[in-house]
Image (tube, rainbow, N blue to C red):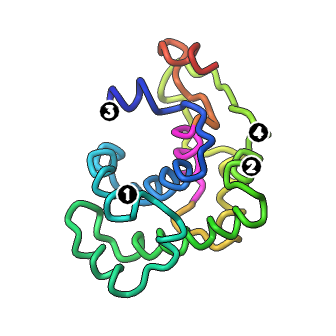
């Protein structure tokens, strides 16, 4: 968790495949701890073809059954089906906007939002931006994209800098 915090969390991310992976992992995390998903990240990458959306969008019943049998990932039928549906919706967004990056970053005006929190208790679980993102993603067919999941995604993808003022990463990412 320390290495993830120090090297990845909150760093602005603009690679479509990496953004898609993060969105799927954040959805998989629903109801679980992030450390659980982080420990399983390599298994998720292997199971989901390194989050290549074109491959995932073509998954059929045999692949879904194999995923349900894969002990390396969270074997939740709804979350697995959502990952496949999200791959299809992701491809539609790429077709419409050119890149998922250009679509997703519109929710923060194309730049990271920098907060100034002193205590972790001040950090919200959602925002007006994550509410808008959640609503739009759901309208486009995404699943497991509630506002809290979207806010966690925004934090992890560096769309929101929620490092505390006392954290060495705050200034690095400001």
Query: Residue at label 2?
Result: 102
Of callouts 4 and 3, the N-terminal one: 3
State yes or no: discs 2 and 1 in contact (Cβ < 8 Å): no
**Spot occupied by residue 158 in the image (x, y as percentages of width and height):** 59, 34
Of callouts 4 and 1, the N-terminal one: 1
Q: Is residue 133 magenta?
A: no
Q: Is residue 147 magenta?
A: yes
State yes or no: discs 4 and 1 in contact (Cβ < 8 Å): no
Query: Residue at label 3?
Result: 1
Foreground disc of the pair 4, 2? 2
Please tell me whether mark 1 sits on a helix, a strand or a loop: loop
Label of residue 31 in the image = 1
The Cα–Cα distance between marks 4 and 2, rounded to whole angstroms, is 8 Å
Q: Main secondary structure of the magenta part?
A: helix
The Cα–Cα distance between marks 2 and 1, rounded to whole angstroms, is 29 Å
Tag count: 4
The stretch of residues the image draws in magenta is: 146-157
Quarter of the image with the C terminus in it: top right
Of callouts 2 and 3, the N-terminal one: 3
Quarter of the image with the N terminus in it: top left
The Cα–Cα distance between marks 2 and 3, rounded to whole angstroms, is 29 Å
**Spot occupied by residue 167 in the image (x, y as percentages of width and height):** 48, 15
State yes or no: discs 1 and 3 in contact (Cβ < 8 Å): no
Dot 2, crowdedness within 10 Å: few (<14), some or many (≥20)?
A: some
Q: From the viewer's perspective, is residue 13 above or below residue 106?
A: above
The Cα–Cα distance between marks 4 and 3, rounded to whole angstroms, is 28 Å
Please tell me whether mark 3 sits on a helix, a strand or a loop: loop
Label of residue 110 in the image = 4
The residue nearer to you, when weighing 134 against 174, is: 174
112 lies left or right of 84: right
Of callouts 2 and 1, the N-terminal one: 1
């Amino acid at each position: 968790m320390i290495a993830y915090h120090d090297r990845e969390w909150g760093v602005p991310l603009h690679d479509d495949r990496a953004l898609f992976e993060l969105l799927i992992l954040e959805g998989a995390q629903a109801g679980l701890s992030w450390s659980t998903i982080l420990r399983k990240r390599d298994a998720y990458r292997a199971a989901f073809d390194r989050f290549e959306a074109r491959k995932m969008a073509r998954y059929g019943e045999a692949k879904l059954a194999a995923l349900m049998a894969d002990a390396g990932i969270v074997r939740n039928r709804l979350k697995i089906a959502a990952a496949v549906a999200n791959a299809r919706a992701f491809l539609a967004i790429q077709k419409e906007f050119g890149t998922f990056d250009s679509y997703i970053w519109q929710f923060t005006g194309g730049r990271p939002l920098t907060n100034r929190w002193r205590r972790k208790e001040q950090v919200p679980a959602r925002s007006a931006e994550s509410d808008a993102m959640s609503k739009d993603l759901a309208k486009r067919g995404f699943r497991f994209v509630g506002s809290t999941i979207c806010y966690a995604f925004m934090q992890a993808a560096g769309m929101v800098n929620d490092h505390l003022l006392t954290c060495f990463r705050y200034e690095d990412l400001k």
